Amino acid sequence: MDETWGLTQMTKVEVVANGDDVAAVTGLFTEVGARGFTAVSNVSGLGHSGQHQGRLLFNDRSSLTYLTVVLPPERAGVLLDGLRELLSDRSGVMLVSDTWVSRPEYFR
Amino acid sequence: MNSKKPVTARVRLLAQVDEAARVVAPLWPLSTCIAVNPLWDLRQMPFHEAVAYAGRVLGIAGYPPPALFAQAYVERRITAADLRAVLDEGHAQEGPAHKSIERCDSRGPELQRGSTAAERHDRLFGTRIAEAVDWEVAKWCAAYLAGIVPDEPAKGFYAAWRQIVVYDPAARSIVGRAGRKLLAELGADAEEAILTCLDLLDVPETNRVPELARHLARMPGWAGHAKWRSRWAAPEHPGPALHLLDYLAVRLSYEAAFLKSAERGRRLPKGHPLRGGSEARGCSTEEEGRAGGGTRRAGVATVGLPDDVATRLSCLDGAESARVWLAAYENHYRDWLLDALDRQQATREVQPAAQAVFCIDARSERLRRHLEAVGPYETFGFAGFFALPIRYRGFGSADAVDLCPVLIRPSTEIAERPPGESHSAADRQLAGRQVVAGARSAFDAARKGAMSQFLLAEAGGFVAGPIALAKTLAPSRYQAARRFVHRVLAPPAATVIDADPAPGALSDEEQTLFAEAALTTMGLTRSFAPVVLLCGHGSTTENNPYASSLDCGACGGNRGGPSARAAAAILNRRAVRRRLAERSIVVPDGTLFVAGEHDTATDTVTVLDTHLVPRSHRDVVAALQRALERAGAAAAAERRSCLPGGEANGRKGLPRERTADWAQVRPEWGLARNAAFIVAPRGLTAGVDLAGRCFLHSYDPRVDPDGVALETILTAPMVVAHWINAQYYFSTVDPAILSAGDKTAHNIVAGVGVVQGAGGDLRVGLPLQSLFDGERAYHEPMRLLVVVQAPLVLLEAVIARNPVLRELFDGQWVNLTAREDPSDDWKIRRRDGTWVRWIPAASHSKEAAVRG
């Protein structure tokens, strides 16, 4: 990362969770003080528990939702702790990576 | 005490609460009773392991009682051949334990069962603290939801309770000075309070999920309500919000305070409210018996069981034996059903005078069968919201209702309005309704007021007494008189459903998508009749807190008429038909969609919006109405013979009399005895008397080459049917915990549920009168049998890409049978995904005998 770009390092947490579990995941985001997040419902894919169809016409609870949130690194650890606990006995994926943002005040 | 807990602890707590809450099912309010599988969030486990787990945590029985099986054997509802067939196949059906179960079992028996600190204390010292906690928590939940507790909405139940509980004499007498001090010192925040109490109660981090789960399991009704509010209700849902965190905070605060009090007093004095009997209560014998999911019940005592079967059954433990009996019970019905379908004669195809689309609800089956018998009518089955997830606002109504399955959110709001420009008739009706509503509101206010109720009794008794007498002695005449008065005060006025595209409403394209989905999924894409009736359903009953449980589940526990009207309005729009034609669905100009509503309590069908029927179609519609009257009468007569007292009680036994009777605890059987969900063209089932036991979803694989329609049917209507079936199953096998109990002792609490008697937990499930005829179960508790006629490759592909279907089929929550087409043999899907040819149990025994 070129320091002249004037970006600030943050941590990005991406979660793919069952529709039933979205409220619990976003509840954790709120608890750690996330200022916002993005959710894409009805995503499809293949994972440890097999294939997942995308959009189901009349069932929002049984399809997957992709959620992403960006946090200061010191708060991301707390979120990961909760997500690990939440996803320990149910299907779901958590991806963590460094990211850079231009307006850090939006994420603190 | 008020030191702030680190955010890490709070975040972990949220995750732990969510995990713990899997053991209870959401409980919808009475206004929109939704049937739900009480173990839905345990569906990742196979059925047999989930009921065993729930037996440990909730204390439920997971299988029908041995007496039911014994009776079924005596009545040849289960035969020795059925048992032999299951025993022969038995172990082939077993698969490896589910991964989540292995994890669960690795936690050890104490963690699996879990117990609250109060329960542990009770076991040690013979106190009854856990019961006292339940009673107090239930009391405050009810008071909070009834609006008796001063509430600051943003702060929630725990904060409101904390403000007032220190003045509660009951709390003061039970928790004593030390407990009160502790209550006063607990933080104002629910999460903080839970964490503080868990620390005070010495619950280690590793034990928190089972401890919290047990807290929720002690009162599945209130916990279920909190779960509904936290996880299912729309955030804007009106009324006091009782959330899971608040609920647990109150429970744990009580436990901590009670135990503090008990600790201070060491041994409680004789006569203290918390003092138990002379023996430690512990886990009662009954609870121990339920610990394996009711599988430690005594074996099935039958007379005349052949030696070979008796010997083999005697080698099984309680769980295995119950599984064999249940499978035999289910397979006997499956054999009957498949045999009946195979024997069905091909129906002669005639051009129908009209087509009628009914809800998949099992109660439509009788009406459909009789309608087809009285004239050239073709019927279809489709979910009663007609693929249109809407929020509906009736004309002049302040509240809107969600008319769609709870698995989805409404995509738009649709309103009812007067037709055209002239609103005078509608305005007159609205004014009359306001008068009636105002009078009712004043009466209710006077009835509930502390002093006014006495004045009301004095002043209104002269009127109320004769009314009560009329309602009792001549219910249908009273109802007719009431309707007449209502018509005079608020004369009927024609209205329409506003389906025209507008900002915020469904666009032409969106309407077309819904229309296409509906027509394709039910297989009605060509050969349209001049009139197509879309028939929703509802049930008219008196004095019935569970009335909405008899309405349409696909419409979120509401009446389905408005959905049918909205769908008909959309399908009659030229812009929609033009777009449908571009998608190869050509609806002729001469075809008219009309809406109707089937009252399942009386089997009458009302055709709605008749003012919109053009002259060209009036004769056909009138003929259809006459046919529906005849079919409804025949269906009602058939149903009457099944209702307790239906034949013997003369006029009072008639369905139309029962529906008006305010003392009638069983206006209809609802969905009792539901057994199967059939996904196939009507040709498979037409003419077969299915006795109102099957959900019938029309499906034509020829118009669904990629399986999208089949996927929609299995992931939504079938899931809803499974919920209904599972609710009936569990309410019947464990009425003590999972039924709503006796209707005659119900007290409604704040419109959210009922309690039995003066207080305690909200009851979950269905009332006893919906399940039992006296002591005998009327409902036959079986897991849903799904019967599909579709290419197996397509079916497997749909299952493979949908985890919810893998869980339900592989986990044996539902049983699946299918065949490619009418020339194919029926096949049974096993839990490992393999298919075996269906062999009826009787033939199976013969083959086994030949094999030696």
Image (tube, coloured by chain):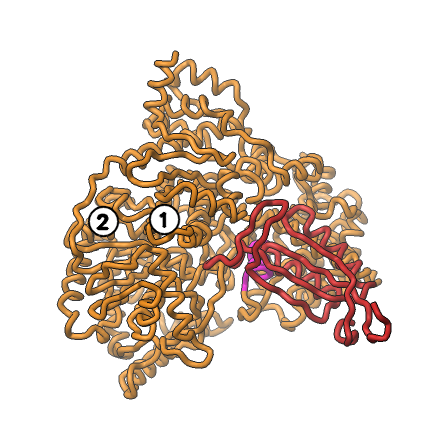
Image colour for chain B is orange
For residue B508, above or below residue A52: below
Residue B577 in view in this figure: yes
Which residue is painted at 26% across and 67% down in the image?
B593
Tally the numbered discs: 2
Measured as percent of width and height from the top left, residue B414 is found at: 40, 74
Amino acid found under the numbered disc labelled 2: Arg
Residue B180 image-quadrant placement: bottom right
Residue B675 in view in this figure: no
**Crowd rating for badge 2 (residues with CA inside 10 Å; few <14, some 14–19, many 20+):** many
Alpha-carbon distance for marks 1 and 2?
17 Å
User: Which tag, 1 or 2, sits closer to the chain's start?
Assistant: 2
Q: Please identify the residue farthest to the top as the structure is shown.
A: B852
Label for residue B671? 1
Q: Quadrant of the N terminus of chain B?
A: bottom right
Measured as percent of width and height from the top left, residue B527 is found at: 23, 59
For residue A99, above or below residue B673: below
